[in-house]
Amino acid sequence: MKNEDRYLKNIEKFICSREPESRSGILMKDSARRLGISRSEYLQIEKPYAFIYQRLPVEIGGEVLNISSGIVLHNRARGPFKGGIRIDPDVNIWETTELARLMTLKTSLADLELGGGKSGIKVDFHKLYEGLKDKLKVDFYPFMDRLKDHIMREFVDHFVERGLVRTYVPAPDMGSSGAEMMLFYNKTHDPAVVTAKPEGIEGWLPGRREATGFGTSYATLKYLEQVGKNPADVTVAVQGFGNVGSYAAHYLHREGCRVVAVTDFYGGVYNPEGIDIPGLMEYAAAHRTVKGFDDKHTIDNAGLFALEADVLIPAASGHVIDKGNVGALGVKLVLVEAANMPVSWEAMGMLQQRGVNLLPDNYVNAGGVIASDLEYKQGVGGVRFNRQQVFQRLETKFDTMWAEMNERREIAGSFSQAACDVAMERTYKAMRTRSLI
Ligand code: GLU
């Protein structure tokens, strides 16, 4: 048995399962071939540096719940492990691994001095609530907020105990936000321990909250410009109206695009004339959902996907478009991956055959970590960036990434493969320079 194969078998034996074939793995393998990276070098880039499993016991309603959490430290060739904390019922070790790998590809594509990592906390608040609501006599949101706070405090304690401060720098991801990040600061009083800290906390960054949505909108507008489309003639459908989807819709609306459909976990709004996005943002901030904003014009996720909009932006969970439903998509021009890995590998190929372009996640949603990079620099370096500098930085980074991707697109075959080539090459070079491979 070859050394590399033995190495893979050992990981799988240890974790007692085989990593499912991943989209980032396929993309990276393809890039390695084009870049002349050998199989054993490739494995050094693709496989994570470490997996950490952490049980988080929390008490609620007189019962102790054991919540599973994991941290995957993927690559730190170019700087500290960086990536968000996902709190979701579907979290599993391999998904967290793929998300960590994607962070390496994201920070590297944006040429940030950061690596890739990710945390996952597996919890289903809705299910837990169903089991406990009669006993606790409390509404869902206060229940979830309180339980999440307990879970996060436990997570932060272990994070600090394990010496991960400034080794792995977390940020929000699905299910977490500034409120949870603040707990890292409360525990350590170190402004560089975490990014996306809420306004007013030492080292917070103006514009960090809007950065991912702004970047998504900026990336979309650059594409439209390249294909000669006027934003005023473009219709947009956005799946997900959390931090990313809402700000993406906001900025696209501001630039004149017609956002015709928006959905979230609970419901959706449809208006072919264009939705009043500022009004919807206000409504969603007060009600924590878009459901109920306009009861006469509703839409569900399947309906949103089927809409014949020019631009489709999945901005919620991953794996929402695969070979089973890609045929039913109505998108005409471009699919913009604001979420991480919303489209499966097969579905990507099928979209390309149909002539629909796809802008990949490690480019589209890089705005968050680009801003995080500035916030981290503030934390360690005593520098300060104002709002204007943050947005300027985002624009410059997106301009550069877009130029690099366009340069390689023809040889690589697609924007996704071009983005992966740029990222892989940079990570590979850093690992070579540091004699890590
Ligand atoms: N969770 C975000 C992402 O997937 C942000 C990561 C960060 O800022 O570290 O890019």
Image (cartoon, rainbow, N blue to C red):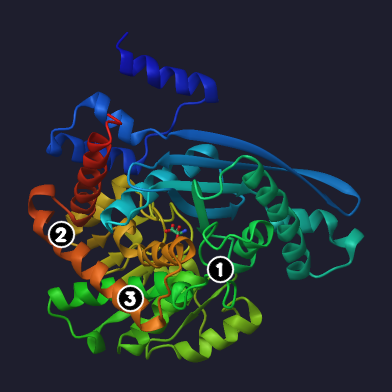
Dot 2 or dot 3, earlier in sequence = 3
Q: Is residue 241 above or below residue 162?
A: below
Quarter-of-image position of residue 325: bottom left
**Up-down relation of residue 302 to residue 169 (above or below):** below
Tell me where residue 221 appears, x and y as whole percent. 24, 77
Examine the rendered structure and indicate whether residue 131 appears above or below residue 248.
above
What amino acid type should be assigned to the residue bearing mark 3? Answer: Ser
Ranked by sequence position, the earlier of labels 1 and 2 is 1
The answer to whether the residue labelled 1 contacts the one labelled 2, judged by CB atoms less than 8 Å apart, is no
Instruction: Name the amino acid type tagged 1.
Output: Lys
Q: Which residue is mark 1?
A: 197
Q: Position of residue 383 (x, y in %)?
A: 42, 71
- Left or right of 173 in this view: 410: left
- Tell me if the residue at label 2 has its CB under 8 Å from ligand 1: no
Q: Which residue is mark 3?
A: 217
Element assignment for label 1: loop
Q: Is mark 1 within 8 Å of ligand 1?
A: no
Left or right of 80, for residue 198? right
How far is disc 1 from disc 2 in space, using C-alphas? 31 Å
Give me the disc on residue 404: 2
